[in-house]
Image (cartoon, helix red, strand yellow):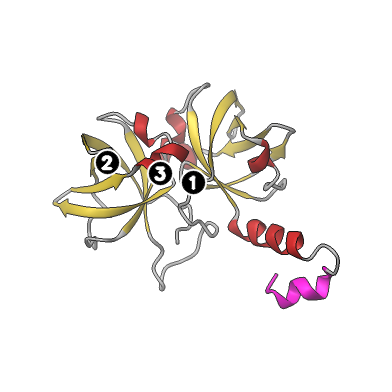
Amino acid sequence: MFTGIVEEIGTVKRIRTQQSVRTLDISCQKIIEDMHIGDSISVNGACLTVIDFKQNQFSVQVIKGTENKTYLANIKENDEVNLERAMSGSGRFGGHFVLGHVDAKGTIINIRETPNSRIVSIKASDSVIKQMVKQGSITVDGVSLTIFDLHQHSFDIHLIPETRRSTILSNKKMGDEVHLETDVLFKYVESIVGKNKSDLSVDKLKAYGF
């Protein structure tokens, strides 16, 4: 479980491929402090497992199933990536519930600058758009963000200066792909509604914890 609050920007130092498994060696400073083999690390929003680490560097593997839903197969050496450790039980919860399971890839179709923020429009599949609500939460490349506007085939996010400073989203250009993960709480509600269309009520939603 993650929060979508990026802790650090890392750099891919080396890429190795063997038997359809891609190993990424990523340099970092902060998140290495309490790292262990088997830890889950969010790399641009994709939950990957640490298989090795040493001073200022760790390694994760990307299997074919992960590659199919992400753009990690296109990551190159020296590319920067958003990094977040799994949420600790004693940590603050500053973003929203993020599983690190990428739902789909989106494509940046427009970027507009304003005095206070950068407005980024992202095209997404119909299935992903249906799981969004205006002012709801969305994870873009591992960053917890708010959906400021929702369109038929796309949505808008606003990047404040701090988000641009502390994540790789400031480097994204029109045409670039991004990882998308919709709000897991919305998915649970959608599932309950789908199974109980005939007798769903406010009281039942409350009983389910919503």
Indicate which disc residue 102 carries. Answer: 1
Q: Which residues are magenta?
A: 200-210
Q: Quadrant of the N terminus?
A: bottom left
Disc 2, SS: strand
Query: Is residue 204 rendered magenta in the image?
Result: yes
Q: What residue sits right under mark 2 in the picture?
A: 21
Question: Of callouts 3 and 1, which one flags the residue occurring earlier in the amino acid sequence?
Answer: 3
Residue drawn 26% across and 36% down?
Answer: 12
Residue drawn 35% across and 33% down?
Answer: 73
Distance of mark 3 from mark 1, alpha carbons?
A: 11 Å
Query: Is residue 206 rendered magenta in the image?
Result: yes
Q: Residues within 10 Å of mark 1 (few under 14, many from 20)?
A: many
Distance of mark 2 from mark 1, alpha carbons?
A: 18 Å
Q: What residue sits right under mark 3 in the picture?
A: 65
Q: Position of residue 200 (x, y in %)?
A: 82, 68
Q: Nearer the viewer, mark 3 or mark 1?
A: 3
